[in-house]
Image (cartoon, helix red, strand yellow):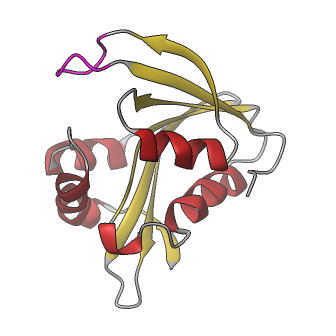
């Protein structure tokens, strides 16, 4: 997998990928808007033919990175694509102190993934998602490399 910065033309493919794997996916317009933001960081994992097989969307503020969305195509899961996207984000943003994100309280697979790469629970937002599910707040010290 090759990781590149997203460009405006990636918005349709990222929206299709998100719709295939996430319960509350971003729209094509939302991806286009995010890609255009100066503080946004959107990286795309590309397969052999250049197709989007995963992405990580985040925003940087000073020495913190907030992961807004991370998705990997079903066929690429458990093959290191998510880990590679997280590692790439950390390596691409020198001077980071911490990375934050929210994960659904009922998504055990995502929670296990984030734990494997070094994120730790630091809080909870009750009823955060539209369906009433809680959001677990996770953080990762960016001064230490991700765990295996």
Residue 118 percent coordinates (x, y): 70, 42
49 lies above or below 123: below
Q: Was residue 131 drawn as part of the magenta stretch in this picture?
A: yes
Which quadrant of the figure has residue 129? top left
Q: Was residue 126 drawn as part of the magenta stretch in this picture?
A: no
Viewer-side residue, 133 vs 30: 133
- Left or right of 66? Residue 69 is left
Viewer-side residue, 92 vs 77: 77
> What is the span of residues highlighted in magenta in the rendered image?
127-133
- Left or right of 68? Residue 141 is right
59 lies above or below 82: above
Q: Main secondary structure of the magenta part?
A: loop
The residue under the point 20% across, 55% down is 15
Residue 66 percent coordinates (x, y): 53, 32
Which quadrant of the figure has residue 69? top left
Residue 78 percent coordinates (x, y): 49, 67
Residue 146 percent coordinates (x, y): 74, 51
The residue under the point 51% across, 68% down is 81
């Amino acid at each position: 997998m090759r990781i590149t910065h997203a460009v405006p033309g990636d918005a349709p493919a990222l929206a299709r990928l998100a719709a295939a794997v996430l319960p509350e996916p971003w729209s094509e317009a939302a991806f286009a808007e995010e890609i255009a933001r100066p503080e946004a960081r959107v990286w795309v994992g590309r397969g052999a033919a250049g197709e989007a097989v995963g992405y990580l969307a985040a925003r940087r503020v000073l020495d913190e990175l907030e992961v807004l969305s991370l998705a990997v195509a079903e066929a690429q899961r458990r093959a290191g694509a998510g880990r590679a996207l997280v590692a790439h984000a950390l390596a691409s943003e020198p001077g980071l102190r911490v990375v934050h994100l929210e994960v659904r309280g009922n998504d055990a697979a995502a929670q296990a993934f984030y734990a494997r790469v070094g994120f730790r629970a630091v809080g909870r937002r009750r009823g955060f998602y539209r369906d009433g599910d809680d959001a677990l707040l996770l953080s990762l010290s960016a001064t230490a490399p991700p765990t295996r």
